């Protein structure tokens, strides 16, 4: 049985901001540089006024290898995944709260990786 949550005031409202997208034709050296990608995500956390809990990164070899970086933040997460074979990456920045700025984090990472083109999407994931 699920319990219904009732928000008593504006202060109780969950503010969910989700910015995500696809980055195309990135320099292959940047795409495979695990330390660079992790550093970019960590700097994006700062720029967007988020509070880091932990960051992890992994490098995957093989034909369709790439790098994944996940930053767990108090407000939610930043996830960056790359695919070597396609010179392609996906970027997901999701935050809850009034003070964080996921658009600033997304913009910083895109400008640093310099894709030839990219798509960006926005979703309001607020409770009301």
Image (spheres, rainbow, N blue to C red):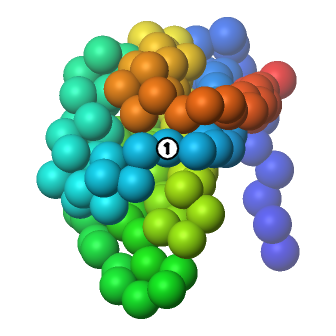
Q: Please provide percent x and percent y for residue 34.
A: 23, 59
In this picture, is 20 found above or below 30? above
Q: Which of 61 and 58 is in front in this view?
A: 61
Residue at point 32% right, 61% down? 32
- From the image, tell me which residue sits under label 1: 26
- Residue 16 visible in the displayed image: no
Q: Please provide percent x and percent y for residue 10.
A: 67, 10
Q: Which of 100 and 6 is in front in this view?
A: 100
In this picture, is 25 found above or below 117? below
Residue at point 54% right, 34% down? 115
Residue at point 58% right, 45% down? 25
Q: Is mark 1 on a helix, strand or loop?
A: loop
Q: Which of 73 and 21 is in front in this view?
A: 21
Left or right placement of residue 49 versus residue 103 in this view: left
Image quarter of residue 36:
top left
> How many marks do you count on the picture?
1
Q: Please provide percent x and percent y for residue 15.
A: 63, 23
Screen quadrant of the N terminus:
bottom right
Left or right placement of residue 81 versus residue 124 in this view: left
The residue positioned farthest toward the bottom in the image shown: 62
Residue at point 30% right, 53% down? 29
Q: Nearer the viewer, residue 61 or 21?
A: 61
Q: Please provide percent x and percent y for residue 118.
A: 68, 32
- Residue 48 visible in the displayed image: yes
Q: Residues within 10 Å of mark 1 (few under 14, many from 20)?
A: many
Screen quadrant of the C terminus:
top right
């Amino acid at each position: 049985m699920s319990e219904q949550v009732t928000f008593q005031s504006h202060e109780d409202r969950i503010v969910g901001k989700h910015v995500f997208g696809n980055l195309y034709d990135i320099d292959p050296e940047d795409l495979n540089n695990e330390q660079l990608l992790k550093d970019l995500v960590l700097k994006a956390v700062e720029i967007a006024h988020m509070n880091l809990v932990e960051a992890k990164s992994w490098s995957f070899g093989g034909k369709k290898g790439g790098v994944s970086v996940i930053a767990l933040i108090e407000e939610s997460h930043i996830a960056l995944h790359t695919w070597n074979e396609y010179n392609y990456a996906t970027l997901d920045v999701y935050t809850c709260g009034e003070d964080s700025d996921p658009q600033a984090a997304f913009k910083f990472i895109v400008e640093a990786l310099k894709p030839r083109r990219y798509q960006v999407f926005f979703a309001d994931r607020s409770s009301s």
